[in-house]
Image (spheres, coloured by chain):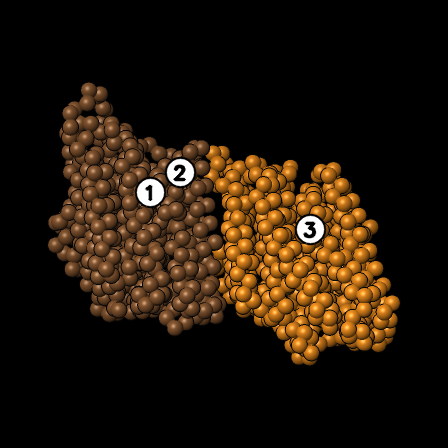
């Protein structure tokens, strides 16, 4: 019986959370929604591991829904590109769900627990769909589900601060504009080719090998739509308020995974489909994505330095870090794509860990966490503070943390592409990251106020420390992440060469 | 005891000292004794390693691979054995001195102070024994972060802004220049290991070598070459034991040591001599020597004056490295020892004067020489050694540096070194002269702090004694530089 279950693993990783989310929506209990979600995500992880096993044997899984063959039916595709991301996703959602309970209990009305976890699973299921889908319209559906779920989750932060509503509304409007752009692009592509399946799209587009204005317009619409969703500078403005006013558990999930999944699809679209128009692609990468990435890195870091609110600070740092990822993806070669994927993994862990720690401080402090409110926290809550310190050092990119590995490979990629100016800029911005991070450390340990240490909640610091230890682990033993990223780049680049 | 075990033991002993200090934080005497015990243990280990290196033994241990071609590894080089010996031996005396100073000056948060002090020594030893450039970088950063709480120890506005300046310059330069330089070396050669004769020759484009040297010398901010020197005077807000051991020995020496190691074991003196890529640095070092000497003259605050003197003396070592001839490198390596002994004596004295007489300014020292004869005696010994008067140990390194510059036919450099000695005489001996002039009318209340008096006397006398045993160190030094 279990085998039947495993046969459909590719579909179930998406369907299971969506299904369970409907079941727990109206549960009045405080604790059961959490337990059920946790069990679901353990199953989710088992399924992901099963997929990994399958991929290591066959290298490719195409799952056809309802046995409709690809050009007509919707299909999921799992291959070397997304299997690593799928695993990271599965593990991280499990950890953050474990972490979320106490945070939700103190930040939202406990009667809303069922609704919160229902939305939580909805977001998880749809984000996972973005990773797996092989259909450009199906992607739009998942984008919309995940956006609506995230917006509702962000709005739950209104109990803490009314600005959460505004942030959610902003995200709703801007996200909808992004999605509209994307779907218009899909419309163009469909009108020209009559297909929505990504593999088929490549074949159909080949007939317009010299390019057609309608196709370029469609591609541009799709890319801009995705850029809005992935918060690539300068269309990132929805992100900082959304991350900072959401309940802390939600910020953790969104910051670590939401933009990453979309970035993944973005790069897949670029290198798997749009690659058949090399001149268009290099135009986009060299004159749009590359300069915007540099701006994102620099401006994101500079704004972060002047933030007083810690969650906002982290959100602006995310803008800069997304800039690093897109910078790597704009390089058009194996080393660039590898380093982009490496940073997707590493930054998900780092930012997840940071948001978890700051989220815990938020519920301890019972207010917005600003710089001054952290005063003396290093003594008051040493366990969490120390984890925050390590995550922060990794964000700066010091050796023995995974942030260093990211930086190393990014430098290598830039160096092989002879982009010395970008190297200098990345080096300067990583030094500027010290400025905003050290302000936090200074407040926590080196201010006049001293506290006796207080008891910390193991349910919360345990997941934080799992992330922290993994940050150090992958800083020392980096080959798993590098191999997965290499694999992703191999798959994408093989398409590039054909 | 196996050689690799010795390395591990040497590196973790300071950490254990820190840990035990924390455990015994409620018993002041016990807490402070761990610094001395740790100093003794690491000193014995360093001494054994030092002798081992003289007998061509190999001290190496590899833990794990960080990335392609770069392991987390320790391997003691001849240069490293010298640096570790200096740092650990002076740690013993500095620990004794710390007890006298911190209690005498009534500083708060002494436990935190002792802990970070030990961690800083740990980082310095690990730098000394690191087996490749990345391991060196890791502990270089740990040294910066662990000395930050010591610089900002007083936690007032002044020390806070000094701490910020300290951290931003040191971490900033290391991330902007040093780390990219390391990446660059790795990308060109595929390794970062220290090897005799260097790894860059035939691997690295010679026309970019000057740029790499520039990135390294400005990236290693701890070497305090101008214009990256502002952090050192700022760091003088720290209690004197920090200025003495860390900002005259461990931290700044870690900086010049790192640069020297890069020149000797990464770039390779031969490659440097072929390409002459570091000749520009000779002039920058000369400029720093002169400029900071002149600034030192204008400083009335004794510690600030000593800080600028340190900047000038550090550039002697950079000068030696930049000249890259064998005599100059010998002088530069030896200067690590001689300047450490001399400058720690001076700082000890400055702190002792502050604790016993509460005087910080040179101009207020009038007549103090008669009241504090031992301290002034030690100060004079240290000052003479730094000036380079025989028979003090400092004369050796200066001799080799001047010989080295003549060997490379930089006659002007030799002259500048001479002028700098004259300036040294002026600004280092001025306090002594003032101290033994007319008694001031002002009554000064003296506090007794014997623990702060004897350490400088010991280091001062050793400046004199080791002049006659210089060969003991020079053997190791010349073992380093086979070119």
Callout 1–callout 2 Cβ contact below 8 Å: yes
Q: Residue at x 22, y 41 (%)?
A: B423
Residue topped by disc 2:
B153
Asked if badge 1 and badge 2 are on a common chain, one would say yes
Q: Which chain is brown?
A: B
**Could you tell me how many numbered marks the image carries?**
3
Q: Which chain is orange?
A: A
Whether A359 is drawn above or below A128: the answer is above
Residue A221 x %, y %: 78, 59
Residue topped by disc 3:
A234
Residue B257 x %, y %: 32, 56
Chain ID at mark 1: B
Q: Residue at x 22, y 27 (%)?
A: B446
Residue B391 x %, y %: 12, 49
Residue topped by disc 1:
B242
- Count residues near mark 1 (Cα–Cα under 10 Å), then give few for <14, some for 14-19, many for 20+: many
Residue B312 x %, y %: 29, 46
Q: Residue at x 76, y 45 (%)?
A: A170
Callout 1–callout 3 Cβ contact below 8 Å: no
* Picture disc at residue B262: none
Chain ID at mark 2: B
Tell me the CA gap for discs 1 and 3.
47 Å
Q: Nearer the viewer, mark 1 or mark 3?
A: 3
């Amino acid at each position: 019986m279990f085998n039947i279950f495993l046969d459909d693993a590719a579909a179930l990783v998406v369907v299971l959370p969506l299904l369970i989310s409907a079941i727990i929506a109206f549960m009045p209990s405080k604790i059961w929604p959490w337990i059920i979600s946790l069990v679901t995500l353990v199953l989710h992880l088992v399924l992901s591991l099963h997929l990994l096993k399958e991929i290591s044997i066959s290298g490719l899984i195409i799952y056809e829904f309802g046995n409709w063959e690809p050009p007509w039916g919707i299909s999921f595709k799992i291959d070397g590109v997304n299997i690593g991301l799928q695993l990271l996703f599965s593990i991280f959602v499990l950890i953050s769900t474990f972490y979320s309970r106490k945070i939700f209990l103190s930040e939202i009305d406990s009667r809303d627990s069922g609704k919160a976890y229902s939305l939580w699973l909805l977001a998880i299921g749809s984000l996972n769909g973005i990773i797996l889908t092989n259909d450009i319209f199906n992607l739009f559906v998942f984008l919309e589900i995940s956006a609506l779920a995230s917006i509702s989750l962000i709005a739950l932060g209104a109990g803490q601060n009314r600005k959460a509503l505004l942030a959610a509304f902003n995200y709703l409007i801007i996200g909808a504009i992004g999605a509209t752009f994307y779907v218009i692009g899909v419309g163009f592509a469909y009108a020209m080719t009559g297909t929505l399946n990504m593999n088929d799209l490549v074949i159909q587009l080949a007939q317009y090998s010299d390019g057609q204005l309608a196709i370029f317009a469609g591609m541009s619409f799709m890319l801009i739509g995705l850029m809005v969703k992935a918060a690539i500078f300068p269309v990132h403005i929805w992100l900082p308020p959304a991350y900072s006013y959401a309940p802390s558990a939600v910020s953790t999930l969104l910051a670590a995974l939401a933009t990453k999944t979309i970035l993944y699809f973005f790069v897949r679209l670029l290198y798997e489909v749009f690659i058949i128009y090399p001149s268009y692609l290099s135009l986009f990468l060299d004159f749009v994505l590359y300069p915007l990435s540099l701006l994102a890195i620099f401006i994101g870091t500079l704004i972060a330095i002047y933030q007083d609110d810690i969650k906002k600070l982290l959100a602006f740092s995310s803008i800069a870090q997304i800039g690093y990822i897109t910078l790597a993806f704009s390089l058009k070669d194996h080393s660039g794509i590898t380093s982009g994927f490496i940073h997707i993994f590493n930054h998900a862990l780092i930012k997840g860990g940071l948001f978890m720690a700051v989220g815990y401080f938020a519920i301890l402090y019972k207010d917005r966490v600003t710089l001054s409110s952290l005063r003396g926290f290093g003594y008051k809550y040493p366990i969490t503070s120390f984890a925050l310190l390590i995550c922060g050092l990794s964000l700066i990119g010091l050796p023995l943390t995974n942030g260093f590995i990211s930086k190393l490979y990014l430098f290598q990629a830039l160096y092989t592409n002879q982009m010395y100016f970008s190297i200098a800029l990345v080096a300067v911005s990583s030094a500027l990251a010290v400025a905003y991070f050290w302000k936090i450390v200074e407040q926590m340990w080196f201010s006049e106020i001293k506290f006796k240490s207080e008891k910390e909640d193991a349910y919360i610091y345990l997941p934080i420390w799992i992330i922290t230890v993994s940050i150090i682990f992958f800083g020392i033993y980096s080959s798993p992440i590098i191999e997965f990223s290499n694999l992703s780049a191999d798959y994408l680049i093989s398409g590039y060469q054909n | 005891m196996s050689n690799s075990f010795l390395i591990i033991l040497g590196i973790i002993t300071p950490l254990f000292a820190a840990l035990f200090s924390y455990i015994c934080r409620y018993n002041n005497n016990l807490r402070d004794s761990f610094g001395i015990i740790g100093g003794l243990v690491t000193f014995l280990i360093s001494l054994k390693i030092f002798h081992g290196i003289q007998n061509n033994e190999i001290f190496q241990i590899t833990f794990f691979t960080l990335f392609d071609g770069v392991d987390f590894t320790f391997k003691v080089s001849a240069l490293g054995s010298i640096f570790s010996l200096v740092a650990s031996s002076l740690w013993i005396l500095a620990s004794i001195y710390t007890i006298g100073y911190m209690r005498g000056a009534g500083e708060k948060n002494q436990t935190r102070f002792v802990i970070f002090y030990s961690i800083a020594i740990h980082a310095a030893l690990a730098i000394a024994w690191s087996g490749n450039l990345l391991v060196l970088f890791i502990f270089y950063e740990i040294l910066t972060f662990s000395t930050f709480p010591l610089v900002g120890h007083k936690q007032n506005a002044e020390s806070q802004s000094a701490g910020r300046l300290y951290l931003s310059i040191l971490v900033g330069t290391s991330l902007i220049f040093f780390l990219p330089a390391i990446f660059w070396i790795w990308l060109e050669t595929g390794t970062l290991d220290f090897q005799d004769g260097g790894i860059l020759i035939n691997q690295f484009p010679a026309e970019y070598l000057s740029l790499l040297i520039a990135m390294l010398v400005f990236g290693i901010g701890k070497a305090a070459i101008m214009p990256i020197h502002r952090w050192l005077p700022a760091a003088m807000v720290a209690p004197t034991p920090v200025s003495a051991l860390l900002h005259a020995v461990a931290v700044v020496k870690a900086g010049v040591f790192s640069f020297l190691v890069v020149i000797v074991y990464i770039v390779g003196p031969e490659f440097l001599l072929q390409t002459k890529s570091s000749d520009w640095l000779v002039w920058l070092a000369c400029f720093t020597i002169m400029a900071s000497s002149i600034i030192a003259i204008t400083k009335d605050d004794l510690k600030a004056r000593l800080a600028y003197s340190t900047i000038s003396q550090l550039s002697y070592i950079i000068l030696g490295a930049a000249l890259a001839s064998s005599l100059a490198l010998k002088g530069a390596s030896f200067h690590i020892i001689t300047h450490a002994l001399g400058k720690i004596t001076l700082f000890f004295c400055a702190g002792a004067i502050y604790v016993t007489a509460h005087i910080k300014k040179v101009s207020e020292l009038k007549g103090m020489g008669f009241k504090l004869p031992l301290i002034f005696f030690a100060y004079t010994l240290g000052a003479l050694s730094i000036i380079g008067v025989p028979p003090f140990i400092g004369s050796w390194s200066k001799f080799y540096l001047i010989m080295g510059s003549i060997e490379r036919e930089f006659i002007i450099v030799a002259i500048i070194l001479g002028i700098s000695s004259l300036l040294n005489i002026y600004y280092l001996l001025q306090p002594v002269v003032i101290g033994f002039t007319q008694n001031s009318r002002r009554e000064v209340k003296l506090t007794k702090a014997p623990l702060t008096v004897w350490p400088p006397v010991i280091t001062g006398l050793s400046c004199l004694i080791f002049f006659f045993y210089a060969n003991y160190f020079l053997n190791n030094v010349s073992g380093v530089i086979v070119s």
